[in-house]
Every structure is written in C-alpha cells, then in structure tokens.
Image (spheres, rainbow, N blue to C red):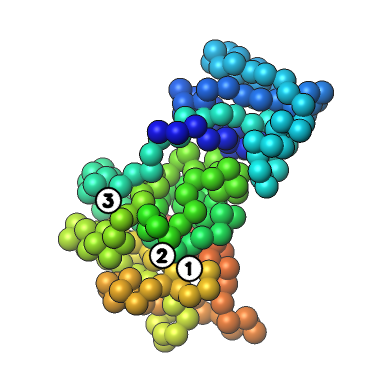
Amino acid sequence: MSDSWIVGINPVEGALSNDAARVREVLVEQGQRNARVQELATRAKALNIPVHHRPREQLDRVSGEARHQGVVARYEAPPMGSENDIERLLEAAGQSALVLVLDGVTDPHNLGACLRSAAAAGATMVIVPKDRAVGLTPVVRRASAGGADRVPLIAATNLARALRTLKDAGVWITGLAGDTDDSVYGIDMRGPVALVLGSEGEGMRRLTRETCDFVAKIPMPGAMESLNVSVATGIVLFEALRQRSDKR
C-alpha cells in the first residue's frame, strides 16, 4: 500500500463515502468558501479525519496537473487487484457478471472516464494490463468522479491469460474493432459478458483479439471513423444494460 492524493470535490466525496478508513487527512485551501468543500471538511472531522487549511500553492503542488477545486485528501491506496481476484469476483456476480477489459488505455483522463462509466453501469470489475495502463493517479481519480472507488480494478500481469480465466468461468468475450462487419447491437449480452476495448491509437493487440469470442463494431453512419475509447466504453456498457432490462 502507498499514500496518494485524491484531488477534487467528487473524488474526495467518493473516498469519504466509500472508503473513509483509508483517508489519512484532508487539505482545504485557505479562504475556501465553496459550500461543498466546507461540507466535506465537516464530514471529515465527524469521521475523526484531520482537516488542515493550507495555502493554494500547497494544494497545487500535491495535485500535479489535476484541478483540485480547493480540496484534496491523502489516501492510503490499497494495491490494485490481481488475476487471483477474478474468479472470486465472477462467482459473486454470477450470471449478471459484466466485465470491462481495457487493453492498453494509457491516457489518465480516458481511464478515469472509463472507470466512471463502469461504476455507473454496475460493472463487476475493470481489467487492465499491469504494464500498459496508467494506474490510479490523481488525474485518473479526478476524471473518474468517484468511480475509481466503486468498481474493482484488476491489473493483469498477462492479459491473454486473464481473458482465458474469464472464458473458463463461462464469460463470453466481445472485442470492439472498426474493421468488422458485425454490429455490437447484434451481440447477445444478457449473460456473463466481458467487453474489450483497445488502446487509443492501436486498438486491441493481436493476441487479445484472437482470444475474443466475438469482434464487433459500433455502427457510425456519420463521417467519423472512430470514437474516443471512453465514449465507446459508455455505449457498449449501456447497450449491455439495455439488453438485460429487455424482458422479451
């Protein structure tokens, strides 16, 4: 475990709501009058978490490039999950398992937005390759708007092996790519499924794609050839939810 900084109103609120035991202190910008920031400070004090008022420059320093909105929290981050956690999470989810796999998303804003969508969709877990993802940086947490604290994030040493673990457990895997005729709207997502999206520039790696049961695309009648990975993630996750809510 290591200390990291959670930056911004929504991420700090998420940490206090979902994992307050790991919040070590909250820093509030001196002179900050934002009602939500003051509410967070009051809540932290009620949880016996130290609250310190500090100059803006100190919050800027610990926040890096993330916008802190006048509040940051020092957080004892647990290690990301490993491949050993996959079977346990699948067993708990049963037939409703919904897994998001991101094969090499390296932009922290994109990863954070994907985690936000995954949390909103009630995803069972998000799996990323250990060596080809940015990790839970302050920017990722800020972009996730609290989603990073609500969905398990698995760092797989061997992504192809993790996908095989999913298949062995009865999960059907659909990868997204633009160079196929099959539409994602024609894939049955009503059972345990995993949705795989590739990196921002290169898409899925060859071995990842070969491990998928299906490869499909999001039809785009407009002039654009591709979507941002976080936008595509939201579309396919909520298509899965739409199908699962369809009683036909």
Secondary element at image label 1: loop
In x, y percent, where is residue 5?
57, 35
Name the residue beneath numbered marker 2: 103
Which residue appears at 38% of the width and 73% of the height?
205
Q: Is residue 244 in sight in this rendering?
A: no
Q: Amino acid at mark 1?
A: Ser
Q: Earlier in the sequence, mark 3 or mark 1?
A: 3
Q: Amino acid at mark 2?
A: Asp
Q: Quadrant of the N terminus?
A: top left
Answer yes or no: do the residues labelled 3 and 1 have beta carbons within 8 Å?
no
From mark 3 to mark 1, how far is it between C-alphas? 20 Å
Q: Which mark is residue 83?
A: 3
Name the residue beneath numbered marker 1: 199
Depth check: 14 or 6 in front?
6
Q: Quadrant of the C terminus?
A: bottom left
In x, y percent, where is residue 36?
71, 29
Q: Which mark is residue 62?
A: none
**Total number of numbered labels?**
3
From mark 1 to mark 2, how far is it between C-alphas? 6 Å
From mark 3 to mark 2, how far is it between C-alphas? 15 Å
Secondary element at image label 2: strand
The answer to whether residue 239 is left or right of residue 97 is right
Residue 104, compared with residue 14, is above or below; it is below
In x, y percent, where is residue 180?
41, 85
Answer yes or no: do the residues labelled 1 and 2 have beta carbons within 8 Å?
yes
In x, y percent, where is residue 237?
45, 60
Q: Earlier in the sequence, mark 3 or mark 2?
A: 3
Residue 192, compared with residue 71, is above or below; it is below
Q: Residue 228 is drawn in which quadrant?
A: bottom right
- Which residue is most to the left? 168
